[in-house]
DNA sequence: GATAAGATGTTA
DNA sequence: AACATCTTATCA
């Protein structure tokens, strides 16, 4: 049960995205802890046309320039939230989108970024909370080691800009990844 | 199985 | 007007 500390997040976004696979996401709610294994992620960086921080700092994207190890939660398509973790040192933007979980405790339907937020009751109140401490009610622990040959890399999903960047990662053979192209 | 459309509100 | 989505409907 070792919680991932700030120096884990304060690195290259692509590496963090890969290494988050197999880690355990925990959400404390009403005295209960909900958990799932991260099985699918996507990377977004400052130089990336698809990133919210691409055109600089705005009220929404300010979180991405903040401290690594914070949560970045945004609202999309009028009804869904998406959960990211801020990466790179402070003042450099970057984030990893959590796209899918394999449920452990009382969870189901977590095979997509919008769905897992609904299951875990993640909304904008959790934007900018510190994910490196249990006190925030949202934290990540080291859990499984995923050997590199079991990490599949593909283009990202659901975006138009820079859709060809091979910045989506998922665990080979896992049945909880979201709709996937190979 | 694939593809299309609709729901819905925040953002710049 | 676009959007880092999901569900339902309509084909096959």
Image: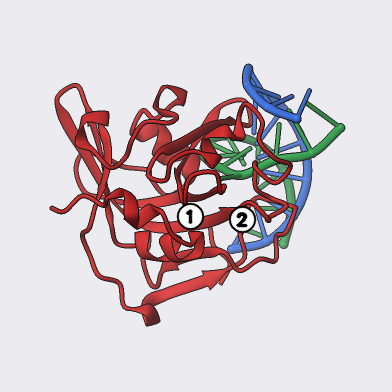
Chain colours: A red, B blue, C green
Image location of residue A144, percent across then percent down: 23, 65
Examine the image and state in which quarter residue A162 appears: bottom right
- Whether residues under marks 1 and 2 lie with C-beta atoms below 8 angstroms apart, the answer is yes
**Chain to which mark 2 belongs:** A
Q: Tell if the residue under mark 1 belongs to the same chain as the one under mark 2.
A: yes
Residue A38 appears in view: no
Assign a secondary structure to mark 2. Answer: loop
The quarter of the picture where the C terminus of chain A appears is bottom right
Seen from the viewer's position, the closer of residues A111 and A52 is A52
Quarter of the image for residue A34 reads top left
Q: Is residue A121 above or below residue A82?
A: above
| Label 1 vs 2, first from the N-terminus | 2
Q: Is residue A38 left or right of residue B3?
A: left
The image shows residue A161 at horizontal and vertical percentages of 75, 53
Which is more foreground, mark 1 or mark 2? 2
- Tell which of A70 and A144 is nearer to you: A70
Which chain does the numbered disc 1 sit on?
Answer: A
Label 2 crowding class (10 Å Cα cut-off): few <14, some 14-19, many 20+? some
Name which residue lies at 19% across and 21% down: A30
């Amino acid at each position: 049960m070792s919680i991932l500390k700030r120096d884990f997040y304060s690195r290259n976004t692509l590496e963090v995205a890969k290494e988050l696979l197999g880690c355990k996401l925990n959400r404390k709610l009403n005295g209960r802890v909900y958990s799932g294994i991260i099985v699918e992620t996507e990377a977004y960086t400052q130089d990336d046309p698809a990133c919210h921080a691409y055109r600089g700092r705005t009220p929404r994207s300010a979180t991405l320039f903040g401290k690594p190890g914070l949560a970045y939660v945004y609202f999309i398509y009028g009804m869904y939230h998406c959960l990211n973790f801020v990466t790179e040192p402070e003042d450099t933007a970057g984030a990893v989108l959590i796209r899918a979980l394999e449920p452990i405790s009382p969870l189901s339907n977590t095979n997509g970024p919008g769905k897992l937020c609904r299951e875990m009751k993640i909304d904008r109140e959790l934007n900018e909370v510190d994910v490196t401490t249990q006190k925030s009610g949202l934290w990540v622990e080291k859990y499984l080691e995923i050997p590199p040959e079991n990490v599949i890399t593909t283009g990202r999903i659901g975006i138009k800009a820079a859709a060809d960047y091979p910045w989506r990662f998922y665990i080979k053979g896992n049945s909880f990844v979201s709709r996937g192209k190979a």
